[in-house]
Amino acid sequence: MRWKRTLQLLDVHCEGEIGRVATGGVPKIPGATVAEQLNWLNTDPKGEELRRFLTLEPRGTPIGSVNLLLPPKHPDADAAFVILQPDQAHASSGSNSICATTALLESGMVEMKEPETIVMLETAAGLVKATATCKDGRCEKVKLTMVPSFVHELDVEIDTPDWGRIRMDISYGGIFYALVDVRQIGLTIDKANAAKLVAAGMVLKDIVNRDIPVVHPEIPAISGVAYVMFRDTEEDGTIRTCTTMWPGRADRSPCGTGNSANLATLHARGKVKVGDTYKSRSIIGTEFEVGLSALSQVAGKQAVIPTITGRGFTFGLHQIALDPFDPLADGFAM
């Protein structure tokens, strides 16, 4: 073969959201910490080339993520990883943490112990503890103890050309979110409205990042609002969510980091307390269990420690390659 580059990927989805895991052929990523590696992937031309190779058409797809497994830096970690998406590399993700845990255990890269295996994942946002329920060689579900999540600002108002004045919360759950009550744009969170929700999310994200700069107070590599997540509350108390992503798609899962960010807003408003749990339902109807396990602080800010529980499923194994004569080597997005 004349291929210039090859990587091996294990295909996994978490509650419908694809999170492929790169298990072989991952090049060395420069950086003394995972946060530095994240920054390199987002700022160095070689990092951008790798991301585009894995996530953009015709080799990749804008639907889902590719998780780069990396040697851990932290002595307590079993594995490190960075999430690659078409727009950039991201620091943290709940669905992708579940995908990575499922891949590590079901491939044998981390020894599976029944009935429970604890996998410590190192992300650019910090350590994520994954407690996997295991039976008959299968990872049945994963409970994540997420990084400390906190509110940046509640009830931020922005002017929009299509919906007038929109109110939102800016909050951090491993990455920064703009959290918007969906009824403000005249829609409900339903598959039939996916295209309209995504279009609205792209508009709102551009306005927010133009007008409201945000940077993590302790991890400068994490900055800017990554996603707009629309939210609603159903009659049974379930939180309905739709996280919108570049270049124009909806998260199929309920979104772990988004629910972590939203949990911080619920606690700030006195709506949840330590020990509470509730369900979050995605646009396609799949569910996470969300819990508030403890309180914390980040740079003097009140923070919460969320738990996110969901399921991952392996569905394939493939190798991706680059022909050096391919005129679309740089990839493209629609």
Image (cartoon, rainbow, N blue to C red):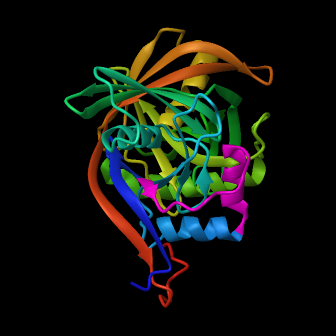
Could you say which quadrant of the image residue 77 lies in? top right
Q: Which residue is drawn at the image coordinates 43% and 42% (left, top)? A: 100
Whether residue 255 is visible to the viewer of this picture, yes or no, is no
**Residue situated in front as seen by the camera: 51 or 269:** 51
Q: Is residue 175 left or right of residue 333?
A: right
**Residue situated in front as seen by the camera: 100 or 237:** 100
Q: Which residue is drawn at the image coordinates 34% and 47% (left, top)? A: 13
Residue 235 sits above or below residue 219 on the image = above
Which stretch did the figure color magenta? 21-44
Residue 217 % position (x, y) = 79, 34
Is residue 28 found inside the magenta-colored segment of the image?
Answer: yes
Residue 166 % position (x, y) = 62, 42
Q: Is residue 237 left or right of residue 186?
A: left
Residue 308 % position (x, y) = 44, 27
Is residue 308 found inside the magenta-colored segment of the image?
Answer: no
Residue 264 % position (x, y) = 60, 24
Q: Which residue is drawn at the image coordinates 48% and 37% (left, top)? A: 94
Whether residue 326 is visible to the viewer of this picture, yes or no, is yes
Q: How many marks?
A: 0
Residue 242 sits above or below residue 330 on the image = above
Residue 57 sits above or below residue 252 on the image = below
Query: In which quadrant is the N terminus drawn?
Result: bottom left
